[in-house]
Amino acid sequence: MSNRFEWSALILRVIAGLTFAIHGVAKFQMGLENVAGFFGTMGLPAFIAYLVTFLEVVGGIALILGLGTRVFAGALSVVMLGAIFKAKLAAGFLGGEGGAGYELDLALLAMLVSLGISGSTKFALDAVLFGKRSVE
């Protein structure tokens, strides 16, 4: 892969990672019981809230560090699809009347799909620990 591509993937990886890690920490701060209750209002079992929160924090940090980028991008893509179709789709792209739309979720999903397809090895722990290099 070209150096320009690797820099682009690094930017996507770090920004997506930061976004997920911060959202996951925010869920811990508001109380996982409250998050589980919110998930319950959508008909989802409480354990999904715990799983999503854990995945956002761990997956976000892993993306920032470049550890298992493709795996965590794939897992977080499932979270984004769930958020779009279960929580946000009815509100529309931009939302309205105080409801959040799915535009941010869709942008994050696009970033994750890109990372899942291409990976990201620039300044990645995977490259250091496992000798993974980008595929040309």
Image: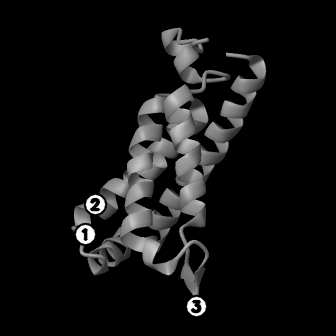
* Residue farthest to the right, as pictured: 4
What residue occupies the far top of the structure in this picture? 131
Q: Secondary structure at mark 3?
A: loop
Asked whether, in this view, residue 8 is left or right of residue 129, the answer is right
Q: Secondary structure at mark 1?
A: loop
Q: What amino acid type should be assigned to the residue bearing mark 2?
A: Ile
Compared to residue 90, the image places residue 59 above or below, namely: above
Q: Nearer the viewer, mark 1 or mark 2?
A: 1
Which residue does the image show at 45% across and 72% down from the upper left? 89
- Between circles 1 and 3, the one closer to the viewer is 3
The three-letter amino acid code for the residue at tag 1 is Leu
Quadrant in which the C terminus is drawn: top right
Q: Residue at x 59, y 15 (%)?
A: 134
| Label of residue 48 in the image | 2
Would residue 22 be seen by someone viewing this image from the given angle? no
Binning the other alpha carbons within 10 Å of mark 3 as few (below 14), some (14 to 19) or many (20 upward) gives: few
How far from the left and from the top, in percent, is residue 78?
Answer: 38, 50
Secondary structure of the residue carrying tag 2 is: helix
How many residues crowd mark 2 within 10 Å: few (<14), some (14–19), many (20+)?
Answer: some
Q: Which residue is mark 1?
A: 44
Sequence-earlier tag: 3 or 2? 2
Q: Is residue 33 left or right of residue 68?
A: left
Q: Are marks 1 and 2 in contact (CB under 8 Å)?
A: yes
Write the residue at 51% across / 40% down.
113
